[in-house]
Amino acid sequence: MSRAIDRDSQRFKKIVRGKIRDDLKKYVTQGEMLGRKGRETVSIPVPNIQIPHFRHGKKGSGGVGQGEGDEGQPIGKGGRPGEGDGPGTAGNEPGRHIREVELSMEELADMLGEALALPNIQPKGKDEISSTKDRYNSVRRTGPDSLRHVKRTYKRALKRSIAAGEFDPRNPVVIPVRDDEEYRSWTTRPEPQANAAVIYMMDVSGSMTDEQKGIVRTEAFWIDTWLKKQYGGLQRRYVVHDAVAHEVDEDTFYRTRESGGTRISSAYAACEKIIARDFPPDQWNIYAFQFSDGDNWGEDNADCLAKLTGGLLPHCNLFCYGQVESPYGSGDFIRELRRVESDHEQLILSEIENRDAIFDSIKDFLGTGR
């Protein structure tokens, strides 16, 4: 019985995950996961799934399709009010339910990789450093008192006492001697750690509406999910900017609402500062993602290109610019970037017209495998 229940449970989980995989684009574009993100898992709302099964009717109630009927008469479920589709009286039956299904972030990343056919990333340069980790997985006969293995020491003393005929069940006192003592011991082994840093930059100026900012946050969530799958030691930094850039924490990045003019070079300067401070390019794989509506102060474009080509692109595995279409932004900045795109293979550009374009934009950015 227990095995049958386990099989049914595994089958049900497989069906649910298949449903999520089939509808993944809907979840990606609509931001279903935002607000449900946990430390290691995420809850996804999916329609309740009924496993097909037989249900017996009442004895003598007749079969399906029996009885007289007129041409064009709708077929209901037993002919009772409130059942079936179409007009009718108010019903008292439960409606369609939603089930919260928990998936690990790794499962989610696998689904994304399959849906977009994303290649695994090939790190550049010195992508790994070795750290050491001690594991207490053995015992030895010498050591400090703080590591004495009390249970094993007592068992050795008890065995010795019984073998020597010194053990008295009526007075079961066992006193370990030096030869009885055992101590916990450890082995030290190197553990490779992939060094990867992601720097997100988002335009929060007045021309970026809440809808555009929502698109950015949704896409950043999925990019993050994939990169964490590829790198075990992912570090993230966040920059928001209007005319001035500010480094913020993750929560502020996903929630902030500001206004003002736009000077994109301020974000590039903040990104350069973060790299110089925290991520030596010869030891880190660096990914920069910038999102804006492309409405930049005209005199700032030359400074942006100088900072990008001279200070950022040489140090980044990828520098991805996503331009979100806005009713208020000019959208001119992507044309400036196209002037240097052919000279820098790590520069990836993507135009994001609406939420439906998020899926393809992620493919643009991560499909290179860099």
Image: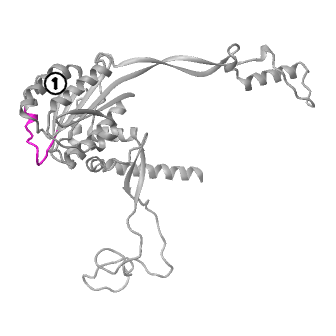
Q: Is residue 344 visible?
A: no
Circle 1: is it few (<14), some (14-19), or many (20+) Cα within 10 Å? many
Residue 71, given in percent of the width and then of the height, sits at 25, 84
Callout 1: helix, strand or loop?
helix
Residue 38, given in percent of the width and then of the height, sits at 42, 43
Label 1 belongs to which residue?
Answer: 308
For the point 40% across and 62% down, the residue is 97
The reply, left or right, for residue 212 in relation to residue 110 is left
Which three-letter amino acid code belongs to the residue tagged 1? Leu
Given residues 261 and 346, the one toward you in this image is: 261
For the point 51% across and 50% down, the residue is 7
The reply, left or right, for residue 123 in relation to residue 205 is right
Identify the image quadrant of the N terminus.
bottom right
Q: Quadrant of residue 342?
A: top left
Q: Is residue 224 visible?
A: yes
Q: Main secondary structure of the magenta part?
A: loop
In the rendered structure, which segment of residues is drawn in magenta?
323-335
